[in-house]
Amino acid sequence: MEMTFAPLLPQLDVKRPLVIAGPCSAESEEQVLATGHALAQQGIKLFRAGIWKPRTKPGGFEGVGVIGLPWLQKLKAETGMLTCVEVATKAHVDAALAFGVDVLWIGARTTANPFAVQELADALAGKDVPVLIKNPVNPDIELWIGAIERIYRAGIRRIGAIHRGFSSADKTIYRNVPQWHLPIELRRRLPQLPIICDPSHISGRRDLIQPISQQAMDLGFDGLIIESHCNPDAAWSDAKQQVTPARLEEILSSLIIRNNVVHTEDLRDLRGQIDEIDDQIIGILAKRMRISREIALFKKEHSMPVLQATRYDEILTRRSEQGASLEMAPEFIKEVFEAIHAESVRKQMEILNQ
Ligand code: PEP
Ligand code: MN
């Protein structure tokens, strides 16, 4: 589906990165105002706070609910900051809009559920409010784009995506593994769509917020959403990943923002050389596939199985060593040759079964 997006927040005159900051959860009027005022003093224009919290297990703090919405209204009246809230049901959308919330976001667990996203889309039909859509918890780009499409079909044109990392069964240093190739693929598919990085939920820990933010900036992300709390250690949710407004200021001012796109003769020349080499690689791959077709015909004639494990192992080991001697990571070469070999086996199987 062809989608054309409108500028997310044209009323804000901000340079990259667009920053959204605020606590994981609104806890009390005092906490919202203390955190919000400190952030506003640093020039932060968008305040986030969870009002309804999706929790893994019941019985924990599930957000203060609608009583928190007037606190956000008050912060907005006192500072002029725009407010952002997570919505997961029609009732959330209605309440947030009734209290003048400026930006809505859809959480990762909700994006993963098309019924829930459709309910939100129906609730948003005919409204004009920016909606940010977090990636689903599982690394499924079609599900992410599907959620964007559902909101788009409801008539919302001010849409942004938030990359907050993906659940993984493996133990890693991250709370949610970034898998950067997914937001990069999203950018390729929807080049106009602003993408915001959420280093807080990717990392789950304070010390990784800065490096992940820098990585996001280097990859061309448009903004950052970072959890900030006036007293992080005492936070009612996600305490380990929240930073004080003062620390947030340090993090933001440490970021190097590379915005230049320079087109010179030299760059054009280098890209020309890359194009030429890519043409050659494709030609050579085609030649390799033709030879493997001949091998398949030979194996068929002599009733040989397609796969000889020792031969495959020899190819992978030899190529990885060759790559290493030319200063390429053995894992990279292994991946390339695994892909080439898989395609070659697929082709040979086709021939064998003709
Ligand atoms: C949040 O932003 O506080 C949140 C619950 O995030 P996610 O949906 O990414 O887990
Ligand atoms: Mn959180």
Image (tube, rainbow, N blue to C red):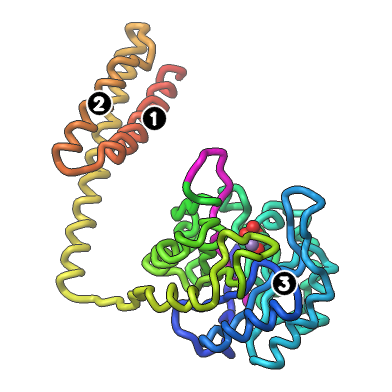
Q: Amino acid at mark 2?
A: Thr
Q: Indicate whether 124 appears above or below 1.
A: below
The answer to whether residue 148 is visible is: no
Amino acid type assigned to the residue bearing label 1 in the image: Ala
The label number, if any, that marks residue 26 in the structure image: 3
Quarter of the image containing the C terminus?
Answer: top left
- Kindly tell me whether residue 296 is visible in this rendering: yes
Q: Residue at x 37, y 16 (%)?
A: 306
> Which residue corresponds to the image point at 63% horizontal and 60% vertical from the top-left?
238
Question: In 3D space, how far apart are the residues under numbered discs 1 and 2 (Cα atoms)?
Answer: 16 Å
Q: Residue lying furthest top in this view?
A: 302
Percent from the top left, x then y, of residue 293?
Answer: 32, 24
Which residue is painted at 83% across and 73% down in the image?
A: 66
First-in-chain label (1 vs 2): 2
Q: Position of residue 150 (x, y in %)?
A: 70, 63
Residue underneath mark 2: 317
Q: Nearer the viewer, residue 125 or 173?
A: 173
